[in-house]
Image: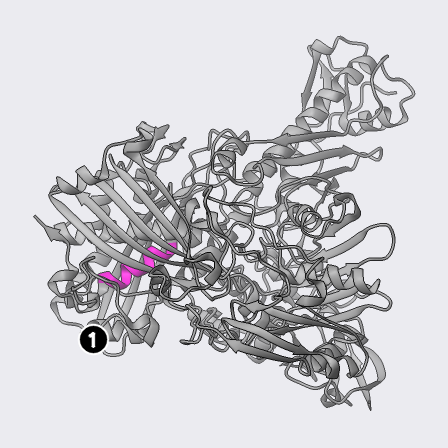
Amino acid sequence: MTVTEDRPAEQAHEIGSARRRKEDQRLITGRAKWTDNVMLPGMLHLAMVRSPFAHAKITHIDVSEAKKSRNVVTVLTGADVADEQGALPCAWPIAEDQKSQAHPSIAVDRVTFAGEIVAVVAARSADEARDAAELVDVDYEELPAVVDLKEAAADTVLAHPDLGTNKSAFWQFDSAGAGTGGSVDDAIRDAEVLIEREYRQQRLIPAYMEPRSYAVDPTGEQYVMWSSTQIPHILKLMLALTLGIPESKIRVIAQDVGGGFGGKLQVTPEEVITMLVARRTGKPCKYTDTRSESMMAGHHGRDQWQKLTLAAKRDGTVTGLKVDLLANMGAYLGLVTPGIPILGAFMFIGIYKFPAYQFNCTNIFTNLTWTDAYRGAGRPEATYAIERMMDQLAAELDMDPIEVREKNWIKHEEFPFTTVAGLEYDSGNYEAATARAKEMFGYDELRAEQKRRRESNDPVQLGIGVSTFTEMCGLAPSRVLGSLNYGAGGWEHAQVRMLPSGKVEVVTGVSPHGQGHVTAWSQIAADRLGVPFEDIEVLHGDTQVSHKGLDTYGSRSLVVGGSAVVAAADKVIERAKPIAAHLLEASVDDIEFEAGRFSVAGTDKGIGIGELALASFSAHNLPDGVEPGLDADATFDPSNFSFPHGTHLCALEIDTETGGVKMRKYVAVDDVGNIVNPLLVEGQVHGGLVQGIAQALWEEAVHDAAGTLVSASFVDYLVPTAADTISFDTDRTVTPSTSNPLGTKGVGEAGTIASTPAVVNAVVDALQPFGVSDVQMPCTPERIWKAIHGSGAGGGEPTEKGAMPHFDEDQSPNVATGTDTAQGDVR
Amino acid sequence: MTRINVQVDGADYADDVEPRMLLVHYLRERLGKTGTVVGCDTSNCGACTVHLDGRSVKSCNMLAVQADGHTVTTIEGLATDGELHPVQAAFRECHALQCGYCTPGMIMQSVDLLNENPNPSEEEIRTGLEGNLCRCTGYHNIVKAVQTAASGGASA
């Protein structure tokens, strides 16, 4: 054993460097392993028969023709599997008295949304399965369907008649009651300025590029499920609980997953059905969505009405905020459906020092596809509301929107700051991010141009939108989740394995689907262990390899999962020290570790970590009582959420003659704490921006009066193209988070959360000369044109009703015309 | 069943296929060319884009029998002798992919775009990629990658 080996070459810091991704080689050469690639001998292919009705009784199903169809192996209805299919899980009941409807994977006697599965065909090829699915003859007796959220809240038509109401649950946070602030009713009573608005969060479709796909192999000792899921670990547990299969008999593999955005944070009927059919037939089975199925039956996102009351003083100081939400659950409660609006409960106050706050949320059933997580999950809704309201306050008081924000935001020297919602924001610097954004944007010049265009009645008006946002990320401290009645903790697991060859395997419990975790985790481990980036392999997404974890969502992976890697690496080093001391004939207390080398303090004696890994593997010369191997496990449970923030500024032109919108410039200055890889951070911001901008301008899941989704394809659901978007100007400020060892805050959702209000604020700002104070999302040219020309903020019947300007029932819903009622009520 | 002869990524294939079989399914299921993927049913997303006789086509929008007698290049045949095509290299260099599902189609379309117009403006790039959807990148870095490839900026 040499104890005087050369020190490794001076290593550059991996953390902070723009490493190109390890993941890319296979993805750019067509060698990725998608779930739909899985082909096994004798594999059966499944096709679903889905209800065309939003609400109907199933009176009869005739499968005889389908069964006779070529190469069909079996056809199963809900009745066939009623005793074995269980009910799909909801892991987040928000209230003791929450009402819910058992959710079978295959409807048994009643369908409650269009697209619900009523039968499944298994055949030897996908085409033959689909052919046979066409032959399944289902008799329905249509029932009244409740499609509109507000009508549902009135309980005139019931989504689930047996429940007796469409109200699933009510949840409140009140700062006076919680002791975190004053009474919002007092604040409203005493307000010098009162802004009341109602905003619509339209229903969105996650639209990940890879349609959902599942394959199950029932041969051997375990059921092996390949799933295009974000949550292999949660899925494994939930499949066991749903189907009564021992958890140890299920292995879930999420290989390459083509995007998720929350849309694959679910335990789906199709997963359970694929498992059921595999169990019944004893054959490997595979199901892959068509795009329309993915859009119709994969869960949707957002869908709220938000009533907001903001109290302020005449100098612009905010004094209270009251929020009343109607949140559309759709027909069932999915994995975390009820909790999605509650994730926004703490964020409606944004970055501002409200002394009084109340949040009320009523979760409502309708006969539509169920909603659940979609990028941002609860927080975009909250941020949209507060950032629109701050603009309205500024407009009301004839103040600059940044000035009114500055007057109310938490100053950088006030951190850590406990908000009126009871959260402790650990760090931030809103002044710095805003100053940088204004500088990059050319704020004053653009305001001057806006003034010129207004004065000259230019048919093309300029709008400037501001969004100064924060979000709670890094889901989550387990204790907090427990207090919110969430079904699991929020910790994350990692394992670092030191291989005898000197290579390193890092096992992570998070489950990447595009984020670049393999690259970032390699950077973290390389720095921590002092081994080359290239020598690190990151393993994930197979419950047999990564045996525990809580998966990827809520901007948690780096903050929680990356911190677990740090903790595991540190344990490896601690395990190695006694062995190093033994080999170097020194006291453990004198062993120092730096840049991959253990050395004896004050000497030039040392040994590299790779060599130590080999020594501990061969175990020929270990100290007494020391186990062979250096591998270590760690779990990390954060002490607090992290709070990324930023300032986004958007400039867009509106052609007042056509309602057409053209984005001119978009500046995003985000503070996501310390950066592991700036390339990945920017990528997340860019993609997030476009998803948020798309909510503002283009996307909406539209249903007809009968509850049929009429935007169930990429022809009708407007996912933006390269031609619709622009290049962005991004930069960062860095105030490290104090709740995790990396000082990171999470970046997955930031762009989406911040951009929607920035864009709508810009649209409304452009239309200010026309007296317009709101345009309902998506702000289509039609809606904008109608807003300008005083015929409502509409565009399409169900959404044409403009946002109510005032909560009085007899006020006309005519926001976009900019009538007096649309303005804040100045006392 | 109809007999087709088709050259894919430099190899010759002779197969009997159902007349209704789409080219993309032929590539994936019969030839194991799973680098080419399906993202939609309406030929909007472009994930399945391949080259037919050197021009980009959406392989979900074509029957396998229509490829009879033609040459198909997929993402798997783009690199030559282990050297990435400059567009592939540029996608990696510019972080123009995240989940990677749209990437094969996006790269094949970008190659076609640059074959037609070796020095496109940003607007020409954006218009040229209009038939390919990406949900992860916001297109920002995809545009940059095409610009980089056009200027010969990224090496394999």
Horizontal placement of A214 versus A201: left or right?
Answer: right
Counting from the top left corner in percent of width and height, residue B67 is at 73, 87
Q: Is residue A756 magenta?
A: yes
Chain identity of mark 1: A
**Near-viewer residue (A447 or A282):** A282
Please tell me which residue lies in front, A275 or A511: A275
Residue A106 lies in what quarter of the image? bottom right
Relative to A641, is A311 on the left or the right? left
Would residue A236 be counted in the magenta stretch? no
Q: Secondary structure at mark 1?
A: loop
Relative image position of residue A60 (x, y in whole percent): 63, 77
Question: In the picture provided, is A13 more to the left or to the right than A96?
Answer: right
Using a 10 Å C-alpha cutoff, classify the residue at mark 1 as few (fewer than 14 neighbours), some (14 to 19) or many (20 or more): some
Q: Which residue is mark 1?
A: A791
Q: Residue at x 50, y 53 (%)?
A: A100
From the viewer's perspective, tell me whether residue B129 is left or right of residue A40: left
Q: Quadrant of the C terminus of chain B?
A: bottom right
Residue that lies at the very extreme toward the right in this rendered image:
A620
- Image point 78% across, 37% down: which residue? A503
Residue B77 in view: no
Tag 1: amino acid: Ser
Q: Where's residue A590, x and y in %?
A: 70, 10
Quadrant housing the N terminus of chain B: bottom right
B54 in relation to A610, above or below = below
Residue A420 position, x and y percent, is 31, 34
Residue ranking furthest to the left: A827
Q: Is residue A601 above or below residue A243?
A: above
- Residue at image coords 33%, 76%: A797
The span picked out in magenta is: A755-765
